[in-house]
Structure formats: C-alpha cells, structure tokens
Amino acid sequence: MTSSTVEPCKSEDFQVDIEKNQQDVRSQWVLNAPEPPSPWHVTIDSVKKTVSNYREKVSSLCDQPCSTLFSALQVVFPILVWGRNYTAAKFRKDVLAGLTIASLCIPQSIGYATLANLAPQYGLYTSVVPPLIYAVMGTSREIAIGPVAVVSLLLSSMVQKLIDPSTDPIGYTKLIFLTTLFAGIFQTAFGLFRLGFLVDFLSHAAIVGFVAGAAIVIGLQQLKGLFGITHFTTKTDIISVMKAVWEAFHNPWNPHNFFLGASFLVFILTTRFVGKRKKKLFWLASISPLVSVILSTLVVFLTRADKNGVKIVKHVKGGLNPISINQLDFNSPHVVDVAKIGLIVAVVALTESVAVGRSFASIKGYQLDGNKEMMSIGFTNIIGSLTSCYVATGSFSRTAVNYAAGCESLISNIVMAITVMISLQFLTNLLYYTPIAIIASVIISALPGLIDITEAYKIWKVDKLDFLACIGAFFGVLFASVEIGLLVAVAISFTKIIVISIRPSTETLGKLPGTDMFCDVDQYPMAIQVPGVMIIRMKSALLCFANANFVKERIIKWVTQEESEDDKGNSKSSIQLVILDTANLVNIDTSGIASLEELYKCLSSHGKQLAIANPRWQVIHKLKVSNFINKIGGRVYLTVEEAVVANNKSNQF
Amino acid sequence: MTSSTVEPCKSEDFQVDIEKNQQDVRSQWVLNAPEPPSPWHVTIDSVKKTVSNYREKVSSLCDQPCSTLFSALQVVFPILVWGRNYTAAKFRKDVLAGLTIASLCIPQSIGYATLANLAPQYGLYTSVVPPLIYAVMGTSREIAIGPVAVVSLLLSSMVQKLIDPSTDPIGYTKLIFLTTLFAGIFQTAFGLFRLGFLVDFLSHAAIVGFVAGAAIVIGLQQLKGLFGITHFTTKTDIISVMKAVWEAFHNPWNPHNFFLGASFLVFILTTRFVGKRKKKLFWLASISPLVSVILSTLVVFLTRADKNGVKIVKHVKGGLNPISINQLDFNSPHVVDVAKIGLIVAVVALTESVAVGRSFASIKGYQLDGNKEMMSIGFTNIIGSLTSCYVATGSFSRTAVNYAAGCESLISNIVMAITVMISLQFLTNLLYYTPIAIIASVIISALPGLIDITEAYKIWKVDKLDFLACIGAFFGVLFASVEIGLLVAVAISFTKIIVISIRPSTETLGKLPGTDMFCDVDQYPMAIQVPGVMIIRMKSALLCFANANFVKERIIKWVTQEESEDDKGNSKSSIQLVILDTANLVNIDTSGIASLEELYKCLSSHGKQLAIANPRWQVIHKLKVSNFINKIGGRVYLTVEEAVVANNKSNQF
C-alpha cells in the first residue's frame, strides 16, 4: 500500500532508503519490546490487588471510624442503601408480590423437601430464614430465595449414598445440615477470594442441557406421588424409574391418586396458559397451585378419601425453625464426602442463582456484583444450616413470578418469609389431609419452564460442539445420574477448549487487493497469494508440545509438495521464503521452540528462508531468550507485508 | 497511513468518498465470507483423507500387481530400498558399530531384565529378535533397539501390582509377555490410524523431568545389587528405598559386593571421561562395561569370592529365544489392567524411540516418518511377545554409542543381534560367576546421561510453567511412583494449555506511529491511544463460558473508570466507542456470544457504541448466525484502523 499510493514526486531510491530505515526501526520495536511480566509476577500482582482492595477498605474504616463504619455496613448490608429511598408505593407492590410468591412457595417447599428425602417442614423452614438473611445482604432486587428443585434432587441423590434416609432419617437430616454448612462456607469463600469464575465453569450450553435433564428426572420422581406408589427406586436414572413404575402397575394400585393429581395438574396448566395469553390474569397462574392445595385438601377431608387409598401428607411439624447447631456432627465418618458434596452443591446452587439474578438485572439495566452475591448466598446458607434449613438459592420459577408480580425490592422476600412463618405457626395442621398427588402436580407444573428447546435449537445452530456439551449433560443426567451429567458437561466443555486450543490447524494467507492486509485465503477468496512466498498462520493460540511437531511436519510437507509440482512443469515458482504469521499465537513453549528450530534447519538445508511476522509479547520474548531469533538471522517483522517487502528487496540487491 | 501519505492532488471529498466505498466493500468481505466447514465436516474430511490414502496404495497395487507389489514391499520394508546401495565400506563400519553396541548391550540387557523383575535371559532375548525385525522395517539409521531402563522400570512397577514376581515368577513373566503384545498392538494401531500426535502428549519439558526422575529411581534400585541386599522393597519411591537401604545397614552386611561394584563403576566412569575428552578413545568407554564384566567374573571365579558373600548371577538359561505364543493367557483375570498398562508402556516406549530417532535424524539431515516408525516398533513388539521378549524400543545410550561408532545403517543392529545370539548359544555358562554388583555398576554408569541439568535450566529460563511440568514429573517419579510422575506431567501440561487458552486477559491497543497498525501498548510503549476510543484485544484464543463473563465485566469496569476520571476534571475525553479487536479469537461459543450481547446492552445504555474488528472465520460466522452483527448495527471492520476511521467520519457528518 505504502509504495503504491505515494506519487512519484520524490526520488525512488531515496524513498526506498527511508522505507528501509523505517522498517528496520519497526523490526527493532518488535525485538526490543520490554520484558513481559512472568507468570509469577502476574499471580503475585493479582493477589496483591485483592489484598490491597480489602486493606483499603479496612484502613479507611480505621481512619474515620464513625462515618465509614456505617459505609462498611452499607457494603455488607445493601438494604441500608436502598432502604433510605424506600417508599410506601413500593411497599404496596412488594407486599402483593410477596404474597404471590408465598402462595407458590408453600406447596413447592413441601414438594422439594420430599424430593430431598426430608420431612415437609424442612422445606418450609428453608423458606423462612434464608429469604430474611438474603433480603438484608443481597444485591439483586428480584431473586426469590428458598429451596429449589435441582439442588434438592442433587442433594438427595448424593447424600443418600452415604446414609439411607429410609432406615436412618435423623442421621440423613444431620448430614444434609452439614452439607448445607459446607456449601455455605464454600460459597462465602468463593466470594471472599474473588473466585467468581468458578461458577462460569458450567457453560451456558451445559446448564441448558443439565437443567432440562434434571427437570425430566424430577418429573419422573413425582410419578411416585402421582400414582401413589409405595415401593419406589432410590435411583434417579430414567431406566430404573420406569422399571419401578412398570413393576408398580403390575401390583394392585389405586387410581384415585392419579385422577386427583392429574385433574389439578390440568387445572394449574390451564391457568398458566391463560395467564400467559392475558398478562392481567398472570396472578391466576401464580395462585393456582395454592388454590389446588386448598381445594384438594378440602375434597379429601370432606370425602375421607384417605381411607380409600389416597395418600396424604399427614403430620407436618408446626412451629418456627428449631436451632440445629447441635445437629452438626463434624466427627461423622462421612465428613470428607460431605465436604465434596458441599462443594458440588455450592457451585450448582450459585450457578442457578447468579444466572437468574443476572438475567433479571440485565432486563432492569443494573449490574450484579458476582462476588458479593456469592458471599450473600453463602452467608445465607451458613445461617440456614444452623436453623434447620437445607441449601437455599435463587429459584428460577419463583423469581420469574416475583418479577411478573411487580416486586420493587427484596422486601417481597421478607413478606414471603413472614407469610410462611405464619403458616408454620398456625396452619400446619390444615396440611394433614393434603394429598401427596397434588404436591407432585405442583412440582410437575413448574418443570416445562426448565426445558428450553428454543435455546437448545439456537445452540445447535450456532455451535455444534456446544450442543454436544448440552446434549451430553442432558443424557448424562437422564441415563446415569445427576453428578455424572454434571461431570460429562464439564468434561466436554473443557475437552472442547483443549481441542480448539491445540488443534494443529494452519491457514495459508494471501494479500487482500487494495490493502496491505494478509488474510486467510479460505475466508477471503479474493485474497491473492504472493508467488515464491508461503505465508502460514496457526489457527490456535499455542504452539506447544501437543501440536508443534504436527505443524512443523505439515509445513515441510506443503513446501515439498509445491516443489514437486514444479518438477512436473507447472508454472509455480519455487518457494524461497516461508513467513510464519504468529499473530494468533498468544504463547509458545519449549517444545514449540524446538519444533521451530527443526523447521528452520530443514528449510535452510533446502535453501529456503524462514521469517516471523507479528509476534505477540510472550512469543517474541521466548524466541529471544532461547536464541532462536539470532539463528534465523533476525528475520522478525512487524507485519507480513514488511516481511514480503524485505524479501523482495534482498532479492533485488 | 492511507490518508496521510497521499498527496493532496485530488479533491479531498472525492478521496473520502472512494475510501468510504472501499471500506464498505471490505466490511462486506468480512460479512460475506463463505461458511466455514463444520466440525463434522472437518472430522469426516480427515477420516476420508486417511482412508483414501490407503485406498490409493491398495488400488495401485491391484492395477500393476508385479511392479507395485515390490514397491509396496519397499514401503513396509525400507531395507529393500537402502539395501540396494549398500557397500562393503559401509558394511565394515556397521560391523564395528554393531560389535561396539553388542558389548554394551549384553551387560545392560541382563541388568534391565533384573530391573523388570525378569530372569536375565529375557533381557538377552529382547536384544535378539526386536533388532532383527526393526532392521528390516525401521526408517531410522541410528536407533539401537532393545530393552531400555525406563520401560523396564515402568513395566515392573505396574505389573508387580497384579502378580507378585517373588511368589509367582512364571505368572508374572506371562503377564509381561501379554503387556508386550498389547503395547505392540497399540503402537501399530497408532501408526495405522495416524495417531502420531499421541506421542506428543508428553511435552519435551515433562520428558526431561520424567527421565531424570526415573534415572534416579533406577539408580536407587541398583543399590540392592551394589550393596548385595537380600530383603529389598518393591516400591520405587525414594523414601521407601532409602528406608530399605537404612534397614539393610542395620543387619550384618557384606562389604565385598560394594567394593567390587564401586571400583568397577569408577573404572567405567573414568574411561567414559577419557572417551569424552579424546574422541578417538571413545571405544574405550563403549567396551569398558563388557571389560568390567569379564574382569570381575574372572576375579570371582579365581578367588571363589561367591563363597565369601559376593552375590553372583548364577544360572543363565542358554539357547535361542523359545517361542512364547502358548504363554499368552487372554483369559487372565488381569487382562483389562494389562491392556491399560500396555497402553501406557506403548506411549512411553514410543516417546523415547521417536525422540531418539528424530534427534539423530535431524543431525544427519533426514526426516523420520513418525507413523511408519510407530508401526515398525509396534510390529517389533508383537513379534517380540511371541518369542519371549519384553517391550523393546530405541535406547538413548546405545543409539548414541552406535552413532559415535560410525554406524551407517540398521545393519549394525543385525550385527548386534547375531553377537548376542552367539553369546546366548555358547557363552551363558561363562556368566555364572558374574557379580550382580557389576551389573548394577553398568546400569548406574548409564544414568548420568539421562539427567540433563543444562536442558532443565534452559527450560527454566524460557518458560516457567514448562519448568513446573518438568519439576512436577521429576518429583512425582521420585516421591510417589513412575505412573504418578507421568500423570503429574500430563496433568500440568494440559492444565497449562487450559489456563493460557481461557485466561481472561485483555490488552489495550494503541496506534504505532507512522503505520496503521494497532498494537498492545504494554508491548510497544511507543503506541499512541486514540482519544475517545477504547480498543481492546483478548489475550486468549477463545471467548467462551470460562472467561467471557470476566472479560465483559472488566471492559465495563474500565469504561466506567475512564468515565469517573473524567468527572474529577481530567482532560481525558469520554469514551464514545469500544472496539473489540478479535484477531486473536479463533473461536467463540454461545456463552461468549451471550456475554457480548450483554456488553453491547450495557454500553448502549450508557450511549456508547461497540465495534468488532478483524474477526476470524469461525467467529464472524457464529456472530452472523446468532444475529449479533445486526444487533450492533453491522459495525464490523476488517481492521481496527478502519473502525476508528469509520467512527471519526460518522462523528463528522
């Protein structure tokens, strides 16, 4: 570009000299770049930054104890900030939203506690303390905190391998509290040490597949309640469950449960459908689960259907959350396993909560502080484990209802908690005749929202390998177990990263007409290859042990192929120069450098030259330190264009 | 560059129009690139290529059966090619080299067989058949095939976990043959399916650390022989071995073994030192092990020192390799474990052989075909397992001696094999009085060459994370076990790939003076940032679930920080445009696209624009399919320069 657009008003020789000088100067820029920070320094810097961040906060607290104590409290309890601008109008909206989610929350809590193999009251407990704690600490405005389906399923499927809940329900419940404590500690630690990225390790695609699979598994578990089956499998995979259902049908079974459950399921789904069509009637969808519970309880109470085989909840222990500190047994032989389960549950719970929080924050146009969120949820679970709660997190379905009901702040969570509290204190006796089939119907009705086929189709369209992670997680959960589904998802996601990063793929570059850009000739078919020069760019970020040798051999093969084509009399000129455009290479390792050295040896033994164009910081540094630059005669250029120009000149003179 | 160097001889408006048009055309090039091949197509293409490669060979064989049968034979047996030009002068050199390596091979084979917990003759068997097979099939000219130290150690440490060789030596030997067969099958399969890259999974740095650790472990194992210890540990880690040695010293022990072994070790090391100083005397170093064996055997025979506690080899079964087909027990309960061990041994053995072959090939200036090499070694081991051999591969030390002795072709391997064959037939009785301490000395003397401190220092200088893999493998082998050392090395190497690939690191770009290049302002301190525009480039190859969210939050933080600095009255203009230079990004996933969408929403809610510059093939394709390009108003440019120019223009008009 440079030489072609300049008018010939200056002497051409002079121009060439200036260009040559400029180019030398630029090559010097490449070669004499300052030393990049070592990995050690990068790590230290990052730790220092985190520490100084906290130190600043603490020191500013020490300097002005009075005013900043309050501002520190404001950081820990955001309610002190937004509470100041809270108005009666907002409160009215929050009360309405709070009552709406409470009506959904009560049947769901009972159902999820059953899913977690716990007594029903533990689900209700988990809807009291955690929302209160989160309301004063959380930064989201819409999240509805409490027990959720996926976490309940995950907990029961993992903890029941340690203690069987049917033989030792008390020991099992204790382990659940311990798991909750560990999960809370891990979540707080993630926030404190700014390890928020751990939550990102479950990719979006994996979550879509995992949640869809979990929804089906949860639905299958509800078949027990819906059909009133007594003997059911403890496994969660589809084959074991279908077998258990099949066997149950071969024993005499009572259809009353199914008809009761199914009819109310149809009712709930119909109101949901109406609510979606007419936005004004959305409250109908929200309260229909509670209405179903009340109606069906009345029906059973009036007809005494429980005598005819309709299974009922029976006794739900009333009263507020009892303290459970004395139930945390750190001397349990399972403590290490429980810690592991706590870690997995912590990550899954945070993933759900952060995903929910972020999506509603982005709708309302504010940013969620991931690390602060983790600390809030973590602290919520730590306190929860001391007050007979199991793992709580932000619920997909109730948060959506909360938002639709027009919540303004976390006060709606407080309203919900108080409502559940009142129910626990005074209304548990009324739950005696509630049919289990209805609880199952309430849970099943929440599941279709978790299976996002549109999103799965979009993933398929955009990224086939992402879809593989999605479908892997889905089938893993469905046919193996919840943990294996998670494992498959994470494994596929990371394998994908490795495969893409080290894929020994290269592209040939050509010059785009009218520019001095060199681009992939496959991506830009109009690009023109330079005769006598082979310009190659890696398609990965690393030239390392896993791909360096393959790349070297491919380049040598290409060069020799071009040569042999010449022998047959083709018009192609023989390759004099191989330019390696290292723009993509973020890093190189010792195996990569060794391969480049072998490539150089091989090329120079055939009378060809090797040049490096556009090396990144780490790459040029390592090539310099390992003395490779001297070996290739300092042929390093800022751009491919300059490498080509330099070659033409050296051929001229 | 374009606008600044053009003389103002044309109307400026006209010029601007042309530029605008050109730029639009180039943006269209970016947007209308052909669709990149899907991962599915890439895989299918690669499989097709491999299959068609073989099919061509077969079909050309069918067309001209006579001439091409011979050329096919030439491919399988390269000896048919190079054998034609073989001369008497070359033969003389090969005989000399063959005898030299045979003299080193006999004591080493006995020692390595002992290291593998096998009877001495199996080491000698392995020096007969494998070299003969490899000589007709291999493509290297220098490799000396036979038993090697690292593979012997690896075999014994893994197989003895299945069957204890001290209680059931016959069963153990059978398992070793089975492992050898599996290793051979895996190696052949690697070559056949062109999986040569599997060998590259052990990085150069990991091999340096692993081999050094293994050398020390092998040396420690020889303390048993050197001190004549009867009760020794079967573990290989340094702590168990030192404990066993310590305990042995507390029992009455016989110093004769040690004095005999140590004095000959000094002799061997001295001759080696002399050989290194005076190149002409290198043969002295090569034959000194055999001389030591002969001298020490004579000394023991004449003084009857075995009656005074000097441990001797005793009976070595004479005669040629017996057939061992009937010893391969596929119904063994360990067959799955043995297959796994076979896979690990196959990779380690190939790594050593290919590394040795490549380094000498590059010295002599020819290329080694990795896939053909694997098939040759694999076939060698398959035949070996049928003729009482254990896993053979190219030996570091003997190949170096072979090269130094002036070998010209693989005929030296045949000479070596015949020499060992003769020894087996006629001379095994003479080995009766050979002291075990001498065998230990011979093995120990070969170890210093495996510990490459210079290379380790070079790795430390060039790449700190590579050094971590090196030192991890070293300590893993030394303090845990050989397998754990390997595992640590592979794990660190792959973790490094993941960390570098997804590190959520970004760099700010500035314009290099006198060019239209935009470069990292840290790498090029002379680069000038464009006011009002923030230009950011990812430092990784992937924008994916693991880093997308972090990158998004960092960019938003930067932009808001710049803004808040403005508020304090700084002269910095506020950011109007964020340009994302995606040149480094080889790929993006659905999480990455979702993050970009959130970034765009956040920026546009603050009145800022987002532009994409220089997207690669996969990235632009996915951004198009997911409709992101339309959302940002088609702001995609070929270069950062064009994005900046387009922004200036839209501000002007």
Image (spheres, coloured by chain):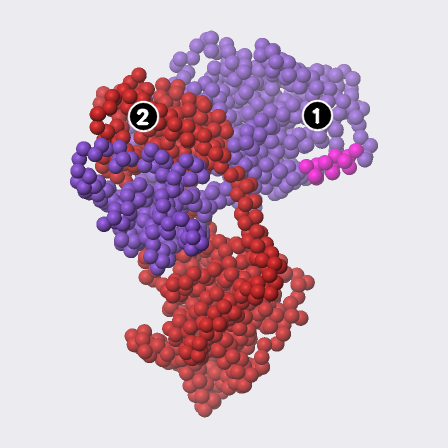
Chain colours: A red, B purple
Q: Position of residue A585 (x, y in %)?
A: 41, 37
Tell me the amino acid under the disc marked 2.
Glu
In terms of secondary structure, where does tag 2 sit?
Answer: helix
Mark 1–mark 2 Cα distance, whole angstroms, equals 73 Å
Magenta stretch, main secondary structure class: helix
Residue at the bottom extreme of this rendering:
A302
Mark 1 touches mark 2? (CB < 8 Å) = no
Residue farthest right in this picture: B252
Q: Which corner quadrant of the image does residue A316 belong to?
A: bottom right
Q: Secondary structure at mark 1?
A: helix
Q: Which residue is mark 2?
A: A19
Q: Chain of mark 2?
A: A
Mark 1 or 2: the one toward you:
2
Q: Is residue B492 left or right of residue A638?
A: right
Quadrant where the C terminus of chain A sits is top left
The residue wearing badge 1 is: B436
The residue lying toward the viewer, choosing from A450 and B641, is: B641
- Residue interval drawn in magenta: B238-249
Compare residues A583 and B473 and report the one nearer the observer.
A583
